[in-house]
Amino acid sequence: MKMRKQKEIADLYKKNNINVLDGFLPQLVAMPIFFAMW
């Protein structure tokens, strides 16, 4: 499940330019870490 989530995020990065997601990036990075803690 965790691996699939990371793959989906990686696919998002490939589809969209990372620059487009610049505002989202910190939240996207923080979310998996957040879930890992719980």
Image: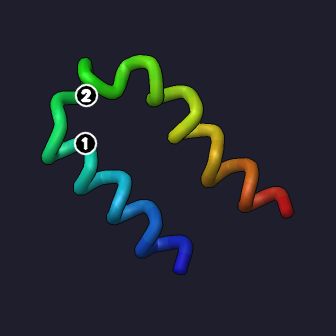
Q: Foreground residue, 22 or 2?
A: 22
CA gap, disc 1 and disc 2:
6 Å
Report the side of 16 relative to 8 (left or right): left
Reply above or below: 31 against 17: below
SS state under label 1: helix
Q: Quadrant of residue 14?
A: top left
Label 2 crowding class (10 Å Cα cut-off): few <14, some 14-19, many 20+? few
Disc on the earlier residue, 1 or 2:
1
Q: Quadrant of residue 25?
A: top left
Q: Residue drawn at (45%, 19%), measured in percent from left and top?
A: 23
Q: Residue drawn at (82%, 57%), measured in percent from left and top?
A: 37
Q: Amino acid at mark 2?
A: Ile
Name of the residue lying farthest toward the right = 38
On-image quarter of the C terminus = bottom right
In the rendering, at what x and y percent does residue 12 appear?
A: 26, 49
Label 1 crowding class (10 Å Cα cut-off): few <14, some 14-19, many 20+? some
The answer to whether the residues at label 1 and label 2 have Cβ atoms under 8 Å apart is yes
In the rendering, at what x and y percent does residue 3 appear?
A: 46, 73
SS state under label 2: helix
Reply above or below: 30 against 33: above
In the rendering, at what x and y percent does residue 2 appear?
A: 55, 72
Q: Which residue is mark 1?
A: 13
Q: Residue drawn at (46%, 66%), measured in percent from left and top?
A: 5
Q: Which residue is mark 2?
A: 18
